[in-house]
Image (cartoon, rainbow, N blue to C red):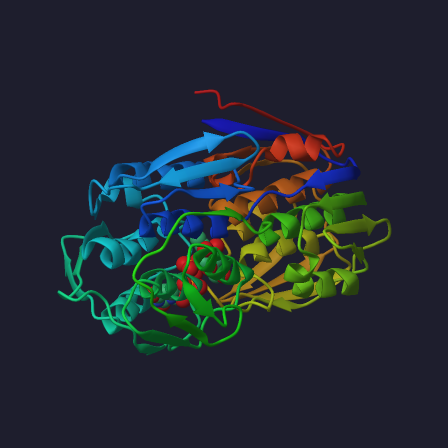
Amino acid sequence: MDRIIISGGHRLSGALPISGAKNSALKLMAASLLTEEPLVLENMPRLADSRFMAHLLAHLGVVAEEQPGSKLKLEGRALESTTAPYDLVRKMRATFNVLGPLIAREGRAKVSLPGGCAIGARPVDLHLKALEALGARIELSEGYVNASAPAGGLTGARIVFPFVSVGATEHAMLAAVLARGTTVLENCAREPEIADLADCLNAMGAKVSGAGSPTITIEGVSSLHGATWAVVPDRIETGTYAMAAAAAGGDVTLTGVRPAHNAALWADLREAGVTVEEGEDTVRIVRDGPIRAVDMQTAPYPGFPTDLQAQFMALMSLAEGASVIRETIFENRFMHAPELSRLGARIDVKGNEAVVRGPAALKGAPVMATDLRASVSLVIAGLAAEGETVVSRVYHLDRGFERLEEKLSACGAVIRREREPV
Ligand code: UD1
């Protein structure tokens, strides 16, 4: 197992390229199950999670070929299996999204209930209700979902989500594109990754409108064809490096981004005293002076993303004053707080609220990554801390951040990876 060693206290400066969005890429990969023709994804992030999804797709009969220039070609000419076994699903929740496409194309599927980051219960009831509304018969048995479509295939339906779910919105879209008739999804998640998936499905011949708004309408088509699609830039990676630059201090330009996708974060960073200059596909982050405490509450898009909450907490530990951070999407998503405290952050957690009292003079220490976003908050704190921080269990980081040490080193961070001694 690897660990990351950071020698903190160095300002960051230079340009830092942003990769394609992990959360979008995984659902776009699932869309390859919907056609016999090749789906070529450009701007693909090379991550443990996308490799994991490729393994599952290969098991189902989709041939994945990495091509130069961050491209991935996926071709599922004839599917070989409709079963997604536990071992190929348990590590990552997004794998569950193969269920809908398999039912839509093959009329049946058996998919293990998912795993993923340990950030709360994270059930899949909304996914299953949406598929049932489209006519799928669903049975749960021995940790698996057994599903089948009626003889004539899935049929369009009106589905009102009781609350906003990114995964369920995407899953319903992935199944409804091949259903007979019209599907109307209401109270949809509005994350940019949802519009990215809808646009890619449309490039494959689907008829999806309204993605990015609360109501999505899908006119079912009988088949989809191949397409080439560039994955939307990763707004979570963008926000993470923006906060790394703000925490360490310096002047960093993030390139290949969609600045509008991080509007909520930019507002909070500006309030905290950080300069944020938005270009067409760049964002420049400058921080020279002190950081001010800002209260923040996570919310579905366009609100502040839960996937940036841990990073924001690391930044607020350096701010002057007290910041109240409220997590409204997932319970149990403050596992980073005790680890940040090991570096000297002063954080009190009560239920879904954390009070961060700054400014703390962070000092390097050994810490442990607990989940994907939590682990990168420790890297951010380590960059700002005095002395050496050692982050173990970095496989969490590798799930979602491409070439992290390389990107940060190029901006002047002193950070390296080594094998963990046994
Ligand atoms: C996705 C993202 C994840 C992000 C989250 C919220 C991917 C691969 N992951 O996760 O990084 O943190 O959106 O922005 O895209 N829920 C139910 N029943 C369901 C589905 C969800 O109760 O059937 C609950 C969840 O437990 C959670 C809330 O709904 O409390 C929102 O979850 P959801 O938006 O579905 O998140 P994911 O799609 O799992």
Foreground: 285 or 313? 285
* The quarter of the picture showing ligand 1: bottom left
Foreground: 252 or 365? 252
Q: Quadrant of residue 263?
A: bottom right
The residue at 37%/71% (across/down) is 219
398 relative position to 325: left or right? left
Query: In the rendering, at what x and y percent does residue 399 appear?
Result: 47, 40
Query: In the rendering, at what x and y percent does residue 42 appear?
Result: 53, 42
Query: In the rendering, at what x and y percent does residue 233 appear?
Result: 60, 50
Query: In the rendering, at what x and y percent does residue 337 appear?
Result: 55, 52
The residue at 72%/45% (across/down) is 254
Foreground: 15 or 58? 58
Position of residue 422 relative to residue 20, above or below, is above
Q: Residue 39, can we see it? A: yes
Q: How many marks?
A: 0
Position of residue 288 relative to residue 58, above or below, is below
In the rendered image, the quadrant that contains the N terminus is top left
In the rendered image, the quadrant that contains the C terminus is top left
Position of residue 193 relative to residue 367, above or below, is below
282 relative position to 31: left or right? right
The residue at 52%/39% (across/down) is 397
391 relative position to 296: left or right? left
The residue at 83%/54% (across/down) is 290
Q: Residue 385, can we see it? A: no
Position of residue 253 relative to residue 312, above or below, is above
